[in-house]
Image (cartoon, helix red, strand yellow):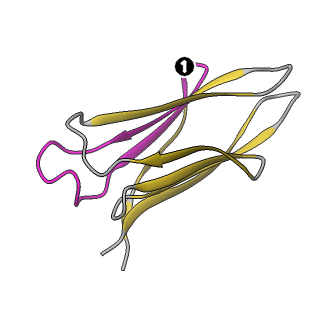
Amino acid sequence: MLLGMDLTFEVGEHERHSVHYHFNQSSGFGVISVDGKPIKRIFQMFAFATTVHCKFSVGNEEIHEVDIQRERKRAFGGVLPQTYRVFIDGHLAVEQAGERGG
């Protein structure tokens, strides 16, 4: 059983950037890329918190703060699909539930 998420979204109005978030819940590995270049690698197998944040800035002249939140249920949260939220400059931009893979 594979659980995880792939999200791709755009950041910026005049200075556009494509952000891709990949997290494999089964292995605990993930990566965040901006314009195809990895900027942050993730490894998290165990977490006591029910919400995990990945925060970073995007842009050179037009800088935006991005916060990708991964939320799990308290009981059996590591083996159930999780909810992913993307906040750009504090505003909810994307919300998606993870899906069960095969």
Which residue is located at x 30 percent, y 52 percent?
45
Quadrant location of the C terminus in the rendered image: bottom left
- Secondary structure at badge 1 equals loop
Tell me which residue sits at (26%, 45%) in the image: 72
Structural crowding at the residue carrying mark 1, measured as other residues with C-alpha within 10 Å and reported as few (<14), some (14–19) or many (≥20)? few
Name which quarter of the figure residue 59 lies in: top right
Instruction: Give x and y (percent) for residue 99.
Output: 38, 64
Relative to residue 66, is residue 26 drawn left or right? left
Q: Looking at the image, which residue is at 24% across and 58% down?
A: 80
Q: Nearer the viewer, residue 78 or 71?
A: 78
Which amino acid is tagged 1?
Gly
Specify start and end residues of the magenta stretch as a single range. 67-92
Q: Residue furthest bottom?
A: 102
- Tell me if residue 80 is in the magenta stretch: yes
Up the image or down, 102 lies above or below 66; here it is below
Q: Residue at x 30, y 57 (%)?
A: 81
Residue extending farthest to the left is 75
Q: Which residue is tagged 1?
A: 90
| Percent of width and height locating residue 53 | 42, 32
Determine whether 100 is above or below 102 in the image: above
Q: Position of residue 88 (x, y in %)?
A: 60, 27
Looking at the image, how many numbered discs can be counted on the residues?
A: 1
Q: Position of residue 42 (x, y in %)?
A: 47, 47
Q: Is residue 65 left or right of residue 80?
A: right
Q: Quadrant of the N terminus?
A: bottom left
Figure quadrant of residue 63 = top right
Above or below 34: residue 76: below
Q: Say whether residue 44 is magenta.
A: no
**Relative to 28, 20 lies left or right:** right
